[in-house]
Amino acid sequence: MQHKSKESNDSPSAADVGNALFESSTAGGTNGGGDALPSFAELFLDKIRAMHEHFDKDQNGYLNFSELSSLQLYTSGDTMDENTYVMVCKTLGCHPNQGIGVEALKLTYASEGADIEEDYKKVFGGAKADTPKLNGGSKGVSKSKGEATDGDDDVIEVGADGFDISS
């Protein structure tokens, strides 16, 4: 019996999971009339890349503690301490010394409760008139401030299971 890859024995990386999420929706890409329209996944990924590039000040392809902290502060108004950063990196399968890559950021924005649209508008000042709005979840490092009536204020969650990283 042949082994397809050594990855079958390893846990999937953020890149593997993120790619699997969008693989089927990026196939095709036409509206039947021959005009190529961007898919939901393409629009989503374009916004993730733009956000990542905007905050990746050293342009090494990863968001380090300072860069991810800036993203968090800008989009939610909250600061991030180094312990939280390390926990976020470990949750996403990233090494804290390297940082969060585009694939890991894509995974966080694909989780429930995250909103790439809201964060993108905060950073870039709103979508262009010809840019379709994405519906659904987006960024896994999300913050809800008094939105729920259960009395939980300032809750920061990471990942699909809503792992609370509040201080």
Image: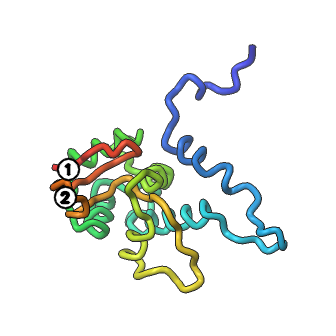
Compared to 152, does 96 lie above or below? above
Q: How many marks?
A: 2
Residue identifier under label 1:
166
Q: Where in the figure is residue 113, as x and y percent of width and height?
A: 38, 56
Front tag of 1 and 2 = 2
What quarter of the picture does the N terminus occupy? top right
Q: Where in the figure is residue 64, as x and y percent of width and height?
A: 34, 54
Residue identifier under label 2:
154
Q: Where in the figure is residue 161, as x and y percent of width and height?
A: 37, 42
Q: Secondary structure at mark 1?
A: loop
Q: Residue at x 38, y 53 (%)?
A: 140
Disc 1 to disc 2, C-alpha distance: 7 Å
Q: Secondary structure at mark 2?
A: loop
Q: Residue at x 20, y 63 (%)?
A: 146
Compared to 153, does 158 lie above or below? above
Q: Residue furthest bottom?
A: 129
Q: Is residue 14 left or right of residue 140?
A: right
